[in-house]
């Protein structure tokens, strides 16, 4: 039954209309946007890079802290800083792949090897932000066994290493990635466009070669 209400279109969101041809499965981005209240959708589209960066950061957070706790509670129990560093390195590899191919999929401006080098240099610098608060907790404030109970040590490790360090490092990485690693916007096709292909116009000087409509579909088979 028609309710008389219409849904306002949001730039960047694929909207199906009755009788229109299907473009295939709806991208996850559009599914997620449709799940939001209509008033929040323009805000989500405007800050989509930050939202995607946050999601990637959450995934990297799980990799980082999962590795850290696995190592520091087993083979690297007396070396929590080493365990944390290994966790950060693994999370950085995951972060680079997901940020390049998803969070900043239309940004670029550098050769791939320069981009990767800068990403890992900045991520290496960010290790100081990740591990600094943990070192402060352990070796300056002496929040470690036998000065405190094992429970207090673990709570302090979590607060300083997993919360404070992660927040500071993520803010630094967000700023540095956009400024130096992926400095220019809209210089690459989005991942969805690369997957679906594009309609590329034929050259003007060869009109006879163009099919009806003047464009050819270069979608990969």
Image (cartoon, rainbow, N blue to C red):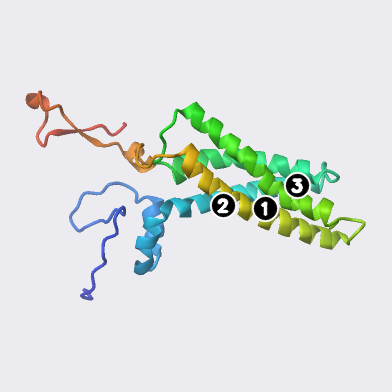
> What residue sits right under mark 3 in the picture?
70
Residue found at x 68% / y 44%: 128
Residue found at x 41% / y 52%: 28
Q: Would residue 60 be seen by someone viewing this image from the given angle?
A: yes
Seen in the image, is 172 located left or right of residue 195? right
Nearer the observer, 189 or 199: 189
Residue 155 figure quarter: bottom right
Q: Would residue 90 be seen by someone viewing this image from the given angle?
A: no
Q: Secondary structure at mark 3?
A: helix
Q: Which of the labelled discs sits on residue 20, or is there none?
A: none
**If you read the primary sequence from the N terminus, does the residue marked by circle 2 or circle 1 appear first?**
1
Q: Which image quarter is the N terminus in?
A: bottom left
CA–CA distance in space, label 2 to label 1: 10 Å
Seen in the image, is 155 located left or right of residue 148? left
Residue found at x 42% / y 41%: 105
Residue 177's place in the image compared with 139, above or below, is: above
Asked if labels 3 and 1 touch by Cβ distance under 8 angstroms, the answer is: no
Nearer the observer, 218 or 146: 146
């Amino acid at each position: 039954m028609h309710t008389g209400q219409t849904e306002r279109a949001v730039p960047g969101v694929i909207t199906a209309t009755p009788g229109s041809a299907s473009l295939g499965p709806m991208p996850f981005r559009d599914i997620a946007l449709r799940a939001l209240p209509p008033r929040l959708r323009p805000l989500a589209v405007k800050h989509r890079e930050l939202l995607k960066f946050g999601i990637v950061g959450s995934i990297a957070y799980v990799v980082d802290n999962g590795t850290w706790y696995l190592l520091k509670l087993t083979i690297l129990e007396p070396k929590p800083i080493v365990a944390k560093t290994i966790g950060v390195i693994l999370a950085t590899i995951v972060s680079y792949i997901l940020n390049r191919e998803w969070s900043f999929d239309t940004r670029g401006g550098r050769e791939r090897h320069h981009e990767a080098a800068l990403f890992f240099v900045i991520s290496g610098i960010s290790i100081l932000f990740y591990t600094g608060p943990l070192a402060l907790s352990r070796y300056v404030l002496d929040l470690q066994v036998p000065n405190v109970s094992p429970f207090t040590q673990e709570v302090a490790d979590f607060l300083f290493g997993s919360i404070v360090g992660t927040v500071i490092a993520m803010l630094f990485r967000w700023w540095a990635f956009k400024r130096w690693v992926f400095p220019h916007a809209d210089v690459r096709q989005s991942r969805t466009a690369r997957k679906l292909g594009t309609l590329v116009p034929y050259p003007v000087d060869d009109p006879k070669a163009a099919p009806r409509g003047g464009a050819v579909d270069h979608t990969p088979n």
